Image (spheres, rainbow, N blue to C red):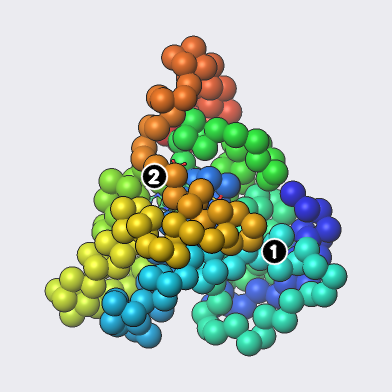
Amino acid sequence: MCMQGVLSLQKHFQAHENDILMMTPPKVGTTWLKAILFAIVNRKHHLDLQKHPLLTNNPHILVPYLDLHLYNKKEVPDLTSCPSPRLFSTHLPYTLLPTSVKNSRCKIVYLYRNPKDTFGVSNFGPYWDHILSYWKESLEKPQMILCLRYEELKEQPTAYLKRIAEFLGYPFSLEEETQGMINNLSRLCRFEYLSKLEVNKSGTTHNIKNESLFRRGEVEDWVNYLTPQMSEKLDDIFKEKFHGTGLTF
Ligand SMILES: Nc1ncnc2c1ncn2[C@@H]1O[C@H](COP(=O)(O)OS(=O)(=O)O)[C@@H](OP(=O)(O)O)[C@H]1O
């Protein structure tokens, strides 16, 4: 984690009441959630899905990271001209968020995933502390923080799109529902669709190859990488860390 960027963010970022923030540990489906939130919030501006910005822009361009990429520079970014509602993303744990976010009424969507499918070195602290920091806050402030699990989203994308839209204060109307809008947006954001677009197969975003953001997008792909012993050891650690919290994977 770049502490300079984090400190600068904490000092300068002023949350707006209608900001929408999405928080994720790395590799849990950030790219997917960015696509979903952008599609939900901006749907009235992009009714023609053949011309949707997701067809020509990687989701990380449409929903910028707050911390590293904006605040790492010497100058503090000017966010005043960002269209409203502002959509931002960060990998920071709750404890490191700017006070202006914690004190505001802006909505936070948090996504997590079976740790065995994200197994790797993270710059954002231990995985369990990250999840627990948001999980605990979401229990206290359910109207402000919505915690979602990648596996649930994958199983019922349309139902979750509807739920996310309601949580954000952008519910789908009956008319939109009957016209198949939720299904259409859900399909637009699917791994199978986004990963085949030229914009996501080539090029880089923030020095990361776009194609690496779309690896396999499957639940329990860890079985192809971890031995049963490794898996059991991790299960034991997670049982201990999440004991009594109600969190399961
Ligand atoms: N649309 C969509 N639907 C479902 N899953 C998706 C989607 N887009 C990306 N992915 C999968 O998300 C994993 C990458 O995680 P992140 O996007 O959080 O990576 S990053 O932190 O932004 O680098 C990575 O998971 P794995 O393939 O299991 O490694 C991606 O394949």
Residue at figure coordinates x 40%, y 24% from the top left: 223
Residue 90 placement (x, y as % from top left)? 62, 58
| Cβ of mark 1 under 8 A from ligand 1 | no
Q: Which residue lies furthest to the left in this view?
A: 178
- What residue sits 61% from the left and 43% below the top? 130
Viewer-side residue, 216 vs 179: 216
Q: Which type of secondary structure does the marked residue at label 1 adopt? A: helix
Residue behind mark 2: 217
Q: How crowded is mark 1: few (under 14 residues within 10 Å), some or many (20 or more)?
A: some
Q: In this view, does 31 lie above or below 76?
A: above
The answer as to whether callout 2 falls within 8 Å of ligand 1 is yes
x%, y% of residue 222? 44, 29
Nearest to the observer: residue 104 or residue 116: 116
In the rendered image, residue 44, in percent from the top left (x then y), is placed at 34, 84
The circle on residue 170 is none
Of the residues shown, which amino acid type is indicated by label 2? Gly
Q: Give the residue number, with chain letter if any, for mark 1.
A: 69
Specify few, some or many for label 2: CA neighbours under 10 Å numbering under 14, 14-19, or 20 or more.
some
**Above or below 178: residue 204:** above
**Mark 2 / mark 1, whichever is N-terminal:** 1
